[in-house]
Every structure is written in C-alpha cells, then in structure tokens.
Amino acid sequence: MSSFFEVFNPGLRHTREHQDLEKVLVVDQKQGGSGPRPLDLDSGTVEIVMPVTADATVTTPEP
C-alpha cells in the first residue's frame, strides 16, 4: 500500500528505503567480544583461552 502513496509523494520512497537500510545495518557493539589476541609466531607458541562454563569440572591430568 505504501507504493500507492509514493506516486503522489516521492519523498516517502526515500524514507521507506532509508528505514529498510537501517534495519539491515544495525550493529550492537556491546554483544561482540574483544577479538583474537595477536599471535607471536617467533616464539612458536600460541595461547588458546576457552570460556569456562558453570557445569564444567576442572580435572588435573595424572603424570
């Protein structure tokens, strides 16, 4: 139905397209993580951090 009104008021088309674009471009930065840490390839080691869950039990391997 909005296309009918766009014939008489072309500004409505711009408004509708802008609102549709805003729906696609929404980015919530509070939900994102800090990103990967830089890797030190010269040392030959990489640190991998796994998130701790509430039901995970910590066990130590026996030598």
Image (cartoon, rainbow, N blue to C red):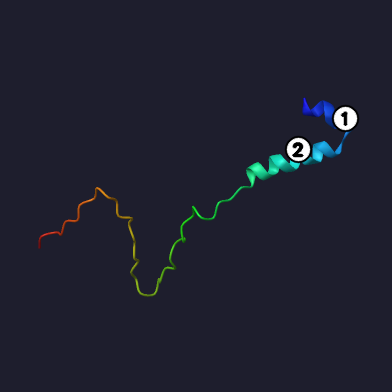
- Where disc 2 sits, the SS reads helix
Q: Residue at x 85, y 39 (%)?
A: 11
Q: Is residue 23 above or below residue 62?
A: above
Q: In this view, does 61 lie above or below 42?
A: above
Is residue 15 toward the left or the right of residue 43 in the image?
right
What's the residue type where badge 1 is placed? Val
Residue 12 lies in quadrant: top right
Quarter containing the C terminus: bottom left
Find residue 41 and report its horizontal and vertical position in percent: 40, 71
Q: Which residue, as the protein is rendered here, is positioned at the far right?
A: 8
Find residue 50 and report its horizontal and vertical position in percent: 32, 57
How far apart marks 1 and 2 lie (CA) works out to 13 Å
Task: State the residue position of label 1.
Answer: 7
- Where disc 1 sits, the SS reads helix
Quarter containing the N terminus: top right
Q: Do the residues under discs 1 and 2 have CB atoms within 8 angstroms?
A: no
Task: State the residue position of label 2.
Answer: 16
Q: Residue at x 64, y 42 (%)?
A: 23
Is residue 58 toward the left or the right of residue 48 in the image?
left
Which class describes the residues within 10 Å of circle 2: few (<14), some (14-19), or many (20+)? some
Is residue 55 toward the left or the right of residue 37 in the image?
left
Q: Which residue is drawn at 84% across and 32% down?
A: 6
